[in-house]
Image (cartoon, rainbow, N blue to C red):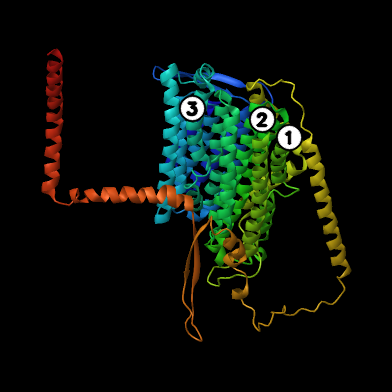
Amino acid sequence: MINALIIIVLLAIILILLTGVRLKGIIALTTVLAMGSISIFTALKSLNGPAWETVLNGTYLFGEVPVRIDSLSAWFILLINFTIITGAVYGFSYMKAHIGRKSDITLHSIAFLLVQFSLTAICVIQNTFIFLLFWEIMALSVFILVIFDHHKPETIKAGINYLVQSHVSIVFLMLGFIFIAIKTGGYSFDSISSYTHSHSSLAGSLLFLVLFTGFAIKAGFVPFHTWLPYAHPAAPSHVSGIMSGVVIKIGIYGILRMLLVIKTDYVTIGYIILSISVISGLYGVMLAIVQHNLKRLLAYHSIENIGIIGIGIGLGCIGLGTMNKMMTILGFSGALLHTLNHSLFKSVLFYSAGNVLQTTGTVNIERLGGLIKKMRASSVLFLISAIAICGLPPLNGFISEFLILGGFYNWLLTADLLSLISIVFSVGALVLIGGLAILCFTKAYSIVFLGTGRDRTLPEATEVPVLQLLPMYLATLLMILIGLFPSFFTGALNDTVNLFTLNAGFNPDLPQVNTPASLASINWLFVGLIALISVLLLIRKRSEKKKVIERGSTWGCGYESPAERTQYTASSFVRSYAKLAKPVLDIEKKEGELNEVFPGKSQYETHPYDKIERVFIDKPLKLLNSFTDQFRFLQNGRLQFYILYGIIFVAAVITIPLLIDKISAILNFLKTM
């Protein structure tokens, strides 16, 4: 499979470089479909079947390269390629507005193919050296996609921020992999497993935490999340959907893969992952609520959902350590299913935001309003995805979050005092995350799509082409199917979950989880309720068809001429929440003073900021800048000084080795005395 993908990618890149701008998108889309078809076909055979294995020829430097598609790889290959295919179809239509930028389209198309290829390769490569190589290709390719609008300073800033933190991630991965290579002399994942199995669980736990940090930066766990709210809004909307849908999920894949190859103290690691994930989920949704940029709001919700996935992983790890079978199954099943679910509804949400941006020219929530009248399909799809991301029935988000809650219930049956405290805080956090998500998306949907337009200077909104809506319909259909037929999808995860349970020494005859069947019943009841309400509304509409309806202005509560300014703004909608969350949030206010009896125009603005970014990024950078400023005198612009620096450098290169030899000779002489 890998050889075929390499040939396809190389041929596509050559064709993209040689063809005209209108053919580049067609070639890129065709290549994405071809690579996706090959990857999906191979992955489907391994999802609930034997693993597919081969060995690629290596070199003296890193040896042979094992390639393996087990059920975990297959699950991620399937969701990666589905999201990238739908993103490519959406992007094919979305990028027509930039058809005049030939060189940018060329780079964008090549980078898009490399992202798909590298993500797929990461899921199958079992050699740490080649794994890091593809990780670097992915990081650089995503960087090129993010900075497509490189004429904007904020886009370049976001891209560099992403690139720097991606390489911090690579540094941690390199530290862990180089350590294993030094200790074992091998680069395969089997070397990691053999080392940790022959040493104490403490050594395995320390190694896992180093690698976890590298993968957590890519996934966007707090406090490693600060790149994400900048990169997602800066990128084109189809790239934002892919980054949130699958790029950050490769960090989740890395964490799960390391859990399979590293022997560690699962209970301790589980508590650490659970704690970080609870903080990530809460902090992400709390910051999302106060955002004014729709894409930035969605970016913070990615952090929230990564937290939910991490809660499931932490729960599964604790289940492995305590030999609680049902807790393990429900934890890992919920995490893996939520990984798929999030890739679906978050990509649709970003595509909807892209539709809004394309037709209005802005994603500033305060300036938007009333778009449901002009963009009915986009507004309905956004609403369905908003319901799903809030974990409400009858959609897919409800299924995965309920599985995780079921895992906590099974933990409760055998819990000690520490476990009870963890359960109370974790379940409370999950409930609070869901409630705050409902508040956030109620604000976003009502302000953007309902009411009337707030900014008359914006262009008239129109619905986007059908080709742009098609991938949104496909993802929404899959969300509905997961909600109504969850047993099929949880059943597809049996072999994947068995990888973890068998690795921990559980009995292979695991109990079957009946929870999805009961969840399906709940969802069908909701479907019945929706159908009943629809029938009643239809009957009412038909019965009132012959009645004369008088139309008039809505009572304006004493205002003679209602205007868009009398509607709720995004800030006023969550004002009470912002007051309650003030100790956690960092919101800067800019407001003009009203001193006159009949004041003129005034302006009031709020700018939310990330406190963690201020503490861990801004302050260290400020200290570093203040230190380096002390040496500014060296860069004075005078040629004479630069020549002098060169002479000093050459002299130092010559004299320092001589001095070292002299000192060594003196020390040796003293030793002989």
Which residue is under mark 2? 319
Helix, strand or loop status at disc 2: helix
- Tag 2: amino acid: Gly
- Tag 3: amino acid: Leu
| Side (left or right) of 579 relative to 548 | left
Label 1 near label 2: C-beta < 8 Å? yes
Helix, strand or loop status at disc 3: helix
Q: Nearer the viewer, residue 130 or 267?
A: 267
Which residue is under mark 3? 207
Task: Pick the quarter of the image with the C terminus.
Answer: top left
Question: Can you see residue 158?
Answer: no
Q: Nearer the viewer, mark 3 or mark 1?
A: 1
Neighbour tally class for label 1: few under 14, some 14-19, many 20 plus, Cα within 10 Å:
some
Could you tell me how far apart the alpha carbons at marks 3 and 1 are, in whole angstroms?
Answer: 30 Å
Q: Nearer the viewer, residue 671 or 625?
A: 671
Earlier residue among tags 2 and 1: 2
Which residue is under mark 1? 410
Q: Is residue 75 above or below residue 261?
A: below
Q: Nearer the viewer, residue 385 or 22?
A: 385
Could you tell me how far apart the alpha carbons at marks 2 and 1 are, in whole angstroms?
Answer: 9 Å
Q: Position of residue 266 (x, y in %)?
A: 59, 28
Neighbour tally class for label 2: few under 14, some 14-19, many 20 plus, Cα within 10 Å:
many
Question: Can you see residue 72?
Answer: yes
Helix, strand or loop status at disc 1: helix
